[in-house]
Image: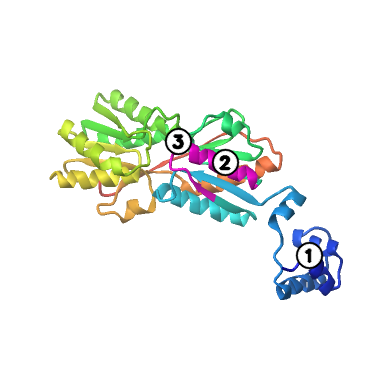
Amino acid sequence: MSTINDVALKAGVSVTTVSRVLNNRGYISEATRSKVFKTMEELNYQPNEIARSLLRKQSNLIGLIIPSVSHPFFSELTNHIEYYAYQNGWKVLLCNSHMDPMKEKDYIAMLKRNRVDGIIMGSHTLEIEEYRNLNSAIVTFDRQIDNDIPFISSDNYQGGVLATELLISKGCRTIVHICGNLKLLMHSNYRNDGFKDTAEKHGVQHITIQTDMNVFDQQQYEQIIQRMLEEYPDVDGIFASSDIIAAFAVRECLGKGKKVPQDVRIVGYDDVDMAAWFIPGITTIKQPIEAIGRLAVELIQKQLDGEVINPEHVLPVELIERSTT
């Protein structure tokens, strides 16, 4: 395997010059730069990224920990984070936690060993101290774990209000909110607050049904919705905390002979791509997924640059009405 010394010898330059070319530091003429790169290609030289990161004290890596990349919301968020990270010179190390505390802890240890420049947290099963002890820039999504650590969320409360106001305006009088487990300290819990406050304001019967602690386990959705339709046969409005849950609700209602939206009106949350592909198209509360991904990368960079930043970043939501209402 060729070394940096081999490249310098064949190119007729110093090792320092090769290092400057690799790290894009100092003035190097275009002719010298081209000669060094051509020599590297001829020798099939691969720089030692670990050594380079130690030298410049920056790995150009960002760690991303999410519950599951198979979930449409997180797959789209990951896509945007990777895009904006790459545009800023970073590569992304993707970690699926599957809401497993031990797995999340192992991933955090791995990211520390790789000296990542920053960590974007979309999964939060560990105690806050696990994050406070990291020596990397951190951004969290939908959970505030420390007053000094920036977080991003959509306006979850307003999302709950918009969804419930729409269902009530369409004539719904028995409304169910199917949400994640409220014992998890997530900002998405505010959707339920917006739902309850709005339903009570209008004097409408409302019921909240929670998932278990693994809120992204889709296998439980079918059972939850079937049980809900049996226990509350008069339900005429459903506010689901994700478009996936909303899609399950549409299927189960149709399976019970209930027409959507004539008998039951359904609103989801997120506005992932599949919400528009589904038949009927799912009415939903749109989270600005691309803006969230871009902002997460920007906040990592600002922390590395030593900028003073506001820890709270709540982005607006939008009602997207389709065929389920």
Counting from the top left corner in percent of width and height, residue 194 is at 37, 29
Q: Amino acid at mark 2?
A: Ile
Q: Amino acid at mark 3?
A: Asp
The numbered disc on residue 108 is 2
The local crowd at label 2, few if under 14, some if 14 to 19, many if 20 or more residues have their Cα within 10 Å, is many
Residue tagged 1: 4
Closer to the eye: label 2 or 3: 2
Q: Please tell me how many numbered marks the rendered image carries.
A: 3
Name the secondary structure under disc 3: loop
Question: Does 3 appear above or below 185?
Answer: below
Our reading of the magenta stretch's main secondary structure is helix
Q: Which residues are magenta?
A: 94-114
Q: Are marks 1 and 2 in contact (CB under 8 Å)?
A: no
Could you tell me which residue is drawn at 44 percent across and 50 percent down? Answer: 69
Spatial separation of the CA atoms under disc 1 and disc 2: 32 Å
Mark sitting earlier along the chain (1/2): 1
Question: Residue 98 colored magenta?
Answer: yes
Q: Quadrant of the N terminus?
A: bottom right
Residue tagged 3: 155
Name the secondary structure under disc 2: helix
Res. 171 visible in picture: no
Spatial separation of the CA atoms under disc 3 and disc 1: 52 Å
Counting from the top left corner in percent of width and height, residue 280 is at 25, 52
Could you tell me which residue is drawn at 48 percent across and 49 percent down? Answer: 77
Residue furthest to the bottom: 42
Question: Does 172 appear above or below 29?
Answer: above
Q: Amino acid at mark 1?
A: Ile
Spatial separation of the CA atoms under disc 2 and disc 3: 28 Å
The local crowd at label 3, few if under 14, some if 14 to 19, many if 20 or more residues have their Cα within 10 Å, is many
Question: Does 243 appear above or below 46?
Answer: above
